[in-house]
């Protein structure tokens, strides 16, 4: 009987500790809302895709970004798709994230 009470007591204690210290999960949607950026720079590389392209953009400070420029994503946000070429100056705005190597990616929702 003492063992059963001890096990129940430890279980309740363990549950209360983990419940009090657990942080609420941040959804990717919340993170995207907080990381909307706008970047202006020269297109240095284009990779064509099925409904758009990926443009590598270098800003005035030499920092590189990879923007996904998709017909579908731009239409959803009320913007218009436009094809840019290497050497063109472009401004993209949208949610961003970094990969494991620190490269910054942008899902273009606005083109200027």
Image: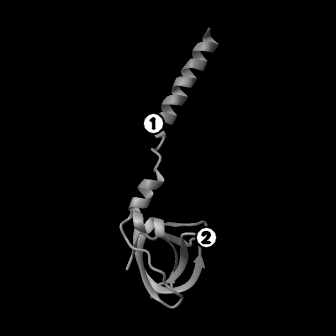
Label total for image: 2
- Write down the residue under mark 2: 101
Outermost left residue: 78
**Is residue 97 among what the camera can see?**
yes
Q: Nearer the viewer, residue 95 or 72?
A: 72
Q: Nearer the viewer, residue 51 or 88?
A: 51
Q: Nearer the viewer, residue 31 or 21?
A: 31
The image position of residue 81, as x and y in percent, is 44, 75
As drawn, 35 above or below 67 = above
Residue 20's disc is 1
Q: Name the quadrant containing residue 89.
A: bottom left
Task: Determine contact: label 2, label 1, CB under 8 Å.
Answer: no
Q: Quadrant of the N terminus?
A: top right
The image position of residue 26, as x and y in percent, is 46, 50
Residue 46's disc is none
**Is residue 95 among what the camera can see?**
no
As drawn, 69 above or below 76 = below
Image point (57%, 18%), residue name: 8
Query: 49 left or right of 28?
Result: right
Image point (57%, 24%), residue name: 10
Q: In front: mark 2 or mark 1?
A: 2
Q: CA distance from mark 2 to mark 1?
A: 34 Å
Disc 1 crowd, CA 10 A, few/some/many (<14, 14-19, 20+): few
Outermost top residue: 1
Q: Nearer the viewer, residue 32 or 1?
A: 32
Outermost right residue: 3
Image point (41%, 66%), residue name: 75
The image position of residue 34, as x and y in percent, is 39, 61
Image point (61%, 13%), residue name: 4
Q: Secondary structure at mark 2?
A: loop
């Amino acid at each position: 009987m003492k063992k059963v009470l001890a096990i129940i007591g430890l279980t309740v204690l363990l549950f209360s500790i983990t419940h009090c210290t657990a942080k609420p999960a941040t959804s990717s949607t919340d993170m995207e809302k907080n990381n909307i950026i706008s970047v202006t720079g020269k297109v240095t590389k284009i990779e064509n895709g099925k409904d758009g392209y990926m443009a590598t953009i270098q800003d005035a400070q030499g920092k590189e970004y990879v923007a996904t420029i998709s017909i579908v994503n731009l239409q959803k946000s009320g913007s218009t798709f436009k094809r840019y070429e290497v050497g063109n100056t472009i401004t993209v705005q949208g949610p961003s994230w970094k990969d494991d190597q620190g490269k910054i990616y942008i899902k273009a929702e606005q083109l200027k």
